[in-house]
């Protein structure tokens, strides 16, 4: 034993908690200020003790976490604060315990921290959506072959592809916004588990802390962790969307494709090989998504514990803010990547025109003109494509004669089948195919531009709402500090 606690408990227990002190320090200061103000309003704290409490809490609020003196040898984070306050004002520091267990203070601090972190992540996600939508609009006419399983599928545009990454990000923004609403509720005044007669109306301290509401049930207020599990999962979901884009861009930036090039500032050169420019930004985004998936899984594992145990939340104090911070960094990075991306439209179109992505449109044309069922038309076009590929031709080179020969091979009457086909040039033109996709959500340029504008509008509203929420938190905390300062003023 070394002092009060065993060294191994200090190392594997308190030190783990104290490592999270920088994440909770500001929130703990605010929680203590609000608790003191309510106790004074309720007449709990004697008048003589108020100036000393105001002074010690104000000093703590002005002291950076690194200079505060958190030391695992004194216990966990709250114990460290208690020791500092008692050293400054003696037993009067004990008034802060009235009507509030240590876990309530830390629960409040976590929510104060996480609601800001969520605003940051929502704003970063909105910036990514804006970057993606604006780039998509700029490439609404940039022809490319869409791919499934890395195989040529159908003619499309890079703008249409990119919007398929923006929409899931907007859905995650909506989920994160709901998470923010859930976190922006106060656990203060919950007491041990069943409330406290000392702190009065719980709505009062919620208002002082800038919370939108209180958590209804006092025991639930102290022990719930499902909201934190959900929001880390949603952060991981956003990162997974970024990962899918990063995976595609890494492939398409290779020499074998050459469709895109990352801005120089998002790459890193090889130390050994002078010709290499590695897509380092994409590597980090992919890795960060993997880490966040692990953290989301870890939160689920921590939640599987008996009720009224602190093991899930003790680790959430660090895991949740760090997960949101990592997700925010990755999202900001991908917004930068998309903004700085160089697209080789010529290489994309060459790949499109060099393949057979018109095949399904040709089969549909054959079906409509020759009145074949689609499966038979599919078989005819499939045979024609195989012969053209073997001859080194492309989809645009397929002729009526090729289809007639393929029809005979498929056991159909070739002349009757191909007589009504007409000129195939338009049918096989990828640009015409893309322009025909003008139904809602399709790849036609005007439709892509319409969707991009809508995405920009949704993202801007989400960004502005997050900024307004953060400003509201700032205003509430500034007003709280003003009120507490007035307690300590003469008269």
Image: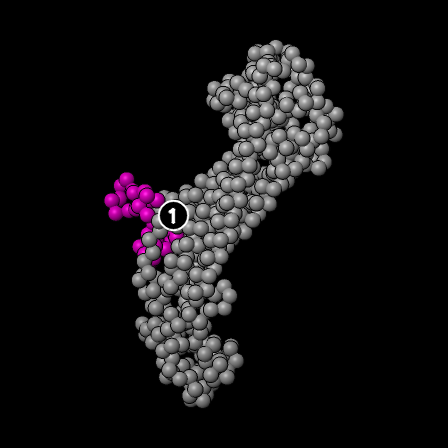
Return the residue nearer the eye: 59 or 429.
59
Where is 125 relative to 142, above or below? above
Where is 446 relative to 367, above or below? above
Q: Quadrant for residue 402, please give it.
A: bottom left
**x, y percentage for residue 225?**
63, 37
- The quadrant of the image that shows the N terminus is top right
Q: Quadrant for residue 484, please give it.
A: top right
- The quadrant of the image that shows the C terminus is top right
Image-based side of 426 in relation to 412, left or right: left
Residue depicted at x 70% and y 22%: 42
Return the residue nearer the eye: 184 or 21.
184
Image-based side of 387 in relation to 13, left or right: left
Residue depicted at x 46% and y 50%: 129
Return the residue nearer the eye: 342 or 362.
342
- Seen as rendered, the residue at the extreme front is 491
Image-based side of 22 in relation to 190, left or right: left
Where is 454 relative to 50, above or below? below
Q: Is residue 459 visible?
A: yes
Q: Is residue 390 visible?
A: no
Image-based side of 272 in relation to 341, left or right: left
Residue under circle 1?
Answer: 337
**x, y percentage for residue 239?**
49, 46
Residue depicted at x 47% and y 83%: 369
Magenta stretch: includes residue 422: no
Tell me the element at label 1. Answer: helix
Residue depicted at x 71% and y 30%: 201
**x, y percentage for residue 450?**
46, 61
Q: Which residues are magenta?
A: 249-278
**x, y percentage for residue 221?**
68, 34
- Seen as rendered, the residue at the extreme left is 274
Magenta stretch: includes residue 261: yes
């Amino acid at each position: 034993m070394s002092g009060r606690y065993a060294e191994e408990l200090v190392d594997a227990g308190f030190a783990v908690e104290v490592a999270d002190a920088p994440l909770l320090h500001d929130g703990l200061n605010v929680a203590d200020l609000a608790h003191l103000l309510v106790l004074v309003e309720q007449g709990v704290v004697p008048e003589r003790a108020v100036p000393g409490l105001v002074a010690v809490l104000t000093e703590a609020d002005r002291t950076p976490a690194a200079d505060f003196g958190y030391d695992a040898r004194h216990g966990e984070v709250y114990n460290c604060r208690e020791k500092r306050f008692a050293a400054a004002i003696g037993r009067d520091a004990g008034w802060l315990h009235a009507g509030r267990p240590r876990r309530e203070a830390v629960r409040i601090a976590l929510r104060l921290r996480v609601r800001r972190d969520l605003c940051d992540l929502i704003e970063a996600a909105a910036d990514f959506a804006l970057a993606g939508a604006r780039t998509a609009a700029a490439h609404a006419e940039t022809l490319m072959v869409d791919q499934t399983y890395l195989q040529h599928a159908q003619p499309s545009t890079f703008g249409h592809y990119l919007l398929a990454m923006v929409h899931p990000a907007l859905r995650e923004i909506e989920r994160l916004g709901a998470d923010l609403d859930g976190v922006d509720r106060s656990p203060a005044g919950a007491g041990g588990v069943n409330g406290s007669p000392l702190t009065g109306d719980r709505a009062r301290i919620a208002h002082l802390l800038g919370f939108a509401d209180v958590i209804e049930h006092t025991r639930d207020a102290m022990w719930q962790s499902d909201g934190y599990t959900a929001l880390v999962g949603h952060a991981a979901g956003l990162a997974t969307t970024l990962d899918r884009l990063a995976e595609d861009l890494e492939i398409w930036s290779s020499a074998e494709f050459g469709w895109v090039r990352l801005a120089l500032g998002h790459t890193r050169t090889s130390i050994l090989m002078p010709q290499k420019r590695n897509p380092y930004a994409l590597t980090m985004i992919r890795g960060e998504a993997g880490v966040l998936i692990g953290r989301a899984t870890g939160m689920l594992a921590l939640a599987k514990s008996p009720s009224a145990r602190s093991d899930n939340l003790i680790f959430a104090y660090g895991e949740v803010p760090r997960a949101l911070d990592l997700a925010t960094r990755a999202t900001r990075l991908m917004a930068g990547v998309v903004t700085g991306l160089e697209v080789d439209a010529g290489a994309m179109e060459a790949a499109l025109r060099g393949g057979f992505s018109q095949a399904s449109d040709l089969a549909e044309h054959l079906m409509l003109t020759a009145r074949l069922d689609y499966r038979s038309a599919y078989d005819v076009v499939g045979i024609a494509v195989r012969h053209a590929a073997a001859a080194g031709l492309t989809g645009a080179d397929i002729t009526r004669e090729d289809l007639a020969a393929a029809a005979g091979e498929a056991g159909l009457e070739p002349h009757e089948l191909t007589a009504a086909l007409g000129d195939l040039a338009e049918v096989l033109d990828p640009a015409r195919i893309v322009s025909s996709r003008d139904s809602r959500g399709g790849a036609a340029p005007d439709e892509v531009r319409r969707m991009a504008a809508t995405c920009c509008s949704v993202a801007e509203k989400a960004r502005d709402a997050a900024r307004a929420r953060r400003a509201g938190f700032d205003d509430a905390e500034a007003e709280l500090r003003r009120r507490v300062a007035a307690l300590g003023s003469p008269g």
